Amino acid sequence: MKKNFVKKTLATTLALAMVATSAPAALTASAAKAPALNKKAKTLYINENEIGSSYNFNVKNTVKGSKYKWTTSNKSVVKVNSANGVVKAGTKTGKATITCKITFKTKKTKTLKATVTVKENATKVWIKNAPETTVGIGEKAYDFNSSFSTASGAKATDYRTWEIDKDSNTAGATINAKTGVVATTKTGEFKVRVRAYQNKAKLAANDTVDSDWLTVKVVSSVKTVAQSATSKVLVTFDDNMKETVKAENFTVTNKKTNAVNGVKEISFSEDGKQVTVTTYGKFEDAGTYVLTYGGKDFEFTTSIGAVETIELATTTVYPNEA
């Protein structure tokens, strides 16, 4: 009886000891973290700067005995060392996917991916549609466009912003910093430039690539021309013209016959933006005329309509009552 009891007790003790020693291993295995990349996204630059043109991707929580192979979706954008995950910016800007394929000892596989964005700073920026002569007055007086280039020839990825020089602005000009659309309020001139920058911090520090200042002259311009009476044409400007124009500044010509209708006089609206040009001769019905101002021609059509009513002063005559 004692021998059997001792044997049973010893067997039970050994079984409990085995359970106790295997439990931590099981818990450790279940708590092990899965392999993962140290970064899921990274930005690189082709040109040298503080961000850098290379990066070392690596795998966290590696599994002993596994094999790791690195590939890139676009070698022109990002190159990668297939053995160690070191990536370098290529020759083009854009995005590429870096893939790490893990093959475990069990022959099972796992794929890890990261996105790499490659950029390049501009080395030159310029205004590509400078006005040929002048711009007018208005909320959308002119829409500027720009372009920039890089040292490598790859597409620049900098941001751009437009700026007007405050000290030289006599035209009340303002500009949309993003779109380059200029608004002006009066005649005068202003200077404008475009700036390329990597990020807001560098813009604030004036670490930018700037175009040359462009001086733009703002002049009053004709908005509309239309007949207003049998011998009058209404010319609408974008500015007060009372101190600017005279009768001799206008010419009115019959487009069909080239006959010139001499200008008799001009008059102004209260704000000076509308100028009525009165000619000596009357316009033809269903005619086309050309008003010339400032070297530019503006066509308008004419319509006389029904014959004008002529009022006569009359006296009532009564028959003689003899």
Image (spheres, grey):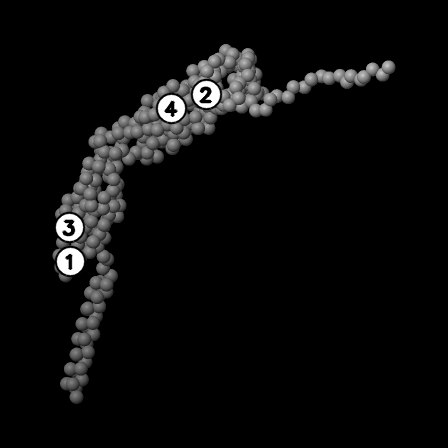
Residue 175 in the image: state x and y as whole percent. Answer: 42, 28
Q: Amino acid at mark 4?
A: Val
| Residue at which label 1 appears | 104
Total numbered labels: 4
Callout in the foreground (2, 1): 2
Q: Position of residue 301 (x, y in %)?
A: 49, 23
Element type where label 1 sits in the image: loop
Question: SS for tag 2?
Answer: strand
Disc number placed over residue 192 in the picture, else none: 4
The Cα–Cα distance between marks 4 and 2, rounded to whole angstroms, is 30 Å
Relative to residue 154, is residue 220 depicted above or below? Answer: above
Label 3 is placed on what type of residue?
Lys
Residue at point 20% right, 43% down?
74
Q: Are marks 4 and 2 in contact (CB under 8 Å)?
A: no
- In space, the residues marked 2 and 1 are separated at their CA atoms by 81 Å
Q: Are dots 2 and 1 in contact, CB under 8 Å?
A: no
**Residue under label 2:** 298
Q: Nearer the viewer, residue 320 or 234?
A: 320
Earlier along the polypeptide chain: callout 4 or callout 1? 1
- Where 16 falls versus 61 (above or below)? below
